[in-house]
């Protein structure tokens, strides 16, 4: 059976860019595909003699029928995942203004913002059912590409979970694509130690300061065990990706050190885990 990724999400959130990255990784890509043709394309790719083992489909705007199409493919034995691309409304408005493109749902009576919110509402069910969610609001093209490559280049074997562990700063907002969010602002803050303030959680002095706190080891050990217990349940529900976000105030010290250490623990447990630090350069 064919490996299928359905790329969907908000207009302007990066569906075409995602298709380009997957094409570079060897996926056969069909862009702006009407939902009614999904079955046909997958059947052709799966036919005897086909040389298309991996198929990426950029879904069109027939959102209401998309989940039914995905369910039908899965019931036919295909391995199908839904990649949902999101972005906050102010960023989408900025992108449309910068490119001078018209939003597909906008007309002379509907502004860009109203069109974005209308589309967002129509996609809520699709977003809730997605296997992987990426928020592109704060990603430049290179960061977006790196995130996709990290997710799809070294994929976990079937039945295994691929983990993304991300450090972030609460002062810059919650990551919209996180599945699990933990707050480590209960730990002493290296920001208030003058010699540690200019460093980050990747530096040895900060790492030692954070990890040597008695509460840190307790937190990591218990959170690790909770994830080890929960991940099989996520897999049973059909998820193959899980984004774990660890937050502190600024996303430079405590969350970075804890994220690095947690990822090391999870890798030792046999999981595939990749690490990102969203706000470390702010």
Image (tube, rainbow, N blue to C red):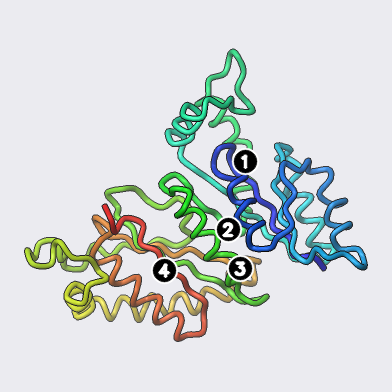
Tags 3 and 4 in contact by the CB under 8 Å rule? no
Q: Is 164 placed above or below 40 here?
A: below
Mark 4: give few (<14), some (14-19) or many (20+) Cα within 10 Å: many
The label on residue 132 is 2
Image quadrant assignment for residue 215? bottom left
Give the x, y percent position of residue 21. Answer: 60, 55
> Quick check: 244 left or right of 204?
right
Tags 2 and 3 in contact by the CB under 8 Å rule? yes
| Residue occupying the point 18% across, 65% down | 199
User: How far, Cα to Cα, is label 4 from label 1?
Assistant: 29 Å
Q: Is 12 placed above or below 152 here?
A: above
Label 3 vs label 4, nearer the camera: 4
How many callouts does the rendering have?
A: 4
Secondary structure of the residue carrying numbered label 4: strand
Tags 1 and 3 in contact by the CB under 8 Å rule? no
Q: Mark 3 — residue?
A: 240
Q: Which of pointers 1 and 2 lies earlier in the amino acid sequence?
A: 1
Q: Which of pointers 1 and 3 lies earlier in the amino acid sequence?
A: 1
User: How far, Cα to Cα, is label 3 from label 4?
Assistant: 17 Å
Q: Which of pointers 2 and 3 lies earlier in the amino acid sequence?
A: 2
User: How far, Cα to Cα, is label 1 from label 2?
Assistant: 14 Å
The label on residue 123 is 1
Q: Which of pointers 4 and 1 lies earlier in the amino acid sequence?
A: 1
Q: Residue furthest left?
A: 194
Res. 223 in view? yes
Instruction: Pick whichever, 241 or 100, lies toward us.
Output: 100
Q: Which of pointers 3 and 4 lies earlier in the amino acid sequence?
A: 3
> Quick check: 90 left or right of 122?
left
């Amino acid at each position: 059976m064919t490996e299928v990724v359905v790329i969907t999400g908000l207009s302007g959130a990066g569906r075409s860019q995602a298709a380009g990255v997957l094409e570079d990784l060897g996926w056969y890509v069909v862009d702006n595909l009407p939902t009614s043709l999904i079955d046909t394309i997958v059947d052709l790719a799966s036919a005897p003699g086909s040389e298309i083992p991996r198929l990426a489909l950029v879904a069109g705007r027939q959102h209401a029928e998309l989940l039914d199409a995905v369910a039908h493919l899965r019931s036919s034995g295909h391995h199908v995942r839904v990649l949902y691309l999101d972005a906050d409304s102010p960023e989408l408005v900025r992108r449309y203004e910068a490119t001078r493109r018209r939003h597909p749902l906008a007309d002379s009576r509907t502004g860009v913002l109203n069109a974005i919110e209308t589309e967002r509402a129509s996609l809520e069910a699709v977003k809730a059912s997605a296997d992987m969610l990426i928020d592109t609001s704060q990603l430049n093209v290179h960061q977006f590409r790196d995130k996709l490559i990290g997710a799809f280049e070294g994929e976990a074997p079937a039945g295994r979970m691929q983990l993304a562990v991300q450090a972030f700063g609460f002062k810059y907002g919650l990551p919209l694509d996180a599945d699990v969010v933990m707050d480590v602002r209960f730990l002493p803050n290296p920001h208030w130690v003058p010699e540690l303030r200019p460093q980050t959680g990747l530096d040895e002095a900060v790492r030692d300061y954070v990890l040597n706190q008695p509460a840190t080891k307790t937190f990591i050990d218990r959170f690790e065990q909770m994830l080890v217990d929960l991940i099989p349940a996520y897999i049973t529900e059909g998820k193959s990706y899980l984004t774990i976000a660890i937050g502190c105030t600024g996303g430079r010290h405590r969350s970075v050190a804890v994220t690095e250490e947690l990822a090391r623990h999870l890798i030792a447990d046999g999981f595939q885990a990749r690490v990102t630090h969203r706000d470390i350069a702010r």
